Amino acid sequence: MLGVYMALLETDEDRERFNSLYLRYRDQLYRIALSVMKDVCAAEDIVSDVFMTIAQNFEKLRGKTEEELNGYVVIITRNRAIDVYRRQKTEAERVSFDDA
């Protein structure tokens, strides 16, 4: 999957920085997503989606400090996980209501 993200980046410098970011944050982001979702597959999907978003918007991150970057990726992951959780919960409630 890392190759897909790399293909979205324009320069070798961006690829190297993204690779470093990926290696540094992937476990932390996975733990955040898993703490919200309580589901391994859903957490992996969320982290993958977050890294896709980061790669697509990588040019906006060039000037960010390490602290800003950390906050950015953590908040994106947490919010994405919460959104997915709420969507799944709403769908489950709708299905159970339709069955009644």
Image (spheres, grey):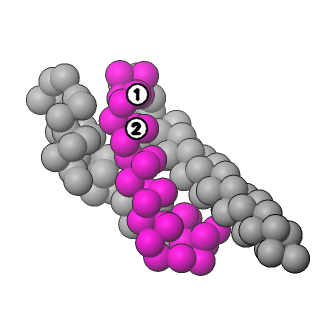
Instruction: Please identify the quarter of the rendering in which residue 23 is found.
Output: bottom left
Tag 1: amino acid: Asn
Q: Residue at x 22, y 29 (%)?
A: 9
**Magenta residues (range):** 32-61
Q: Residue at x 45, y 47 (%)?
A: 50
Q: Residue at x 50, y 67 (%)?
A: 42
Tag 2: amino acid: Ile
Res 93 visible: no
Res 36 visible: yes
Instruction: Give 79 or 18, whichever is nearer the viewer.
Output: 79
Callout 2: SS = helix
**Left/right of residue 13 with respect to residue 42 in the rendered view:** left
Q: x, y percentage for residue 94? A: 79, 63
Q: Is residue 100 above or below residue 50?
A: below
Q: Is residue 13 above or below residue 75?
A: above
Q: Is residue 88 above or below residue 78?
A: below
User: For mark 2, does the 10 Å Cα neighbourhood hold few (<14), some (14 to 19), or many (20 or more) residues?
Assistant: many
Instruction: Give 94 or 7, whichever is nearer the viewer.
Output: 94
Q: Which residue is mark 2?
A: 54
Q: Marks 1 and 2: CB-CB under 8 Å?
A: yes
Between the residue at mark 1 and the residue at mark 2, the CA separation in whole angstroms equals 5 Å
Q: Which residue is mark 1?
A: 57
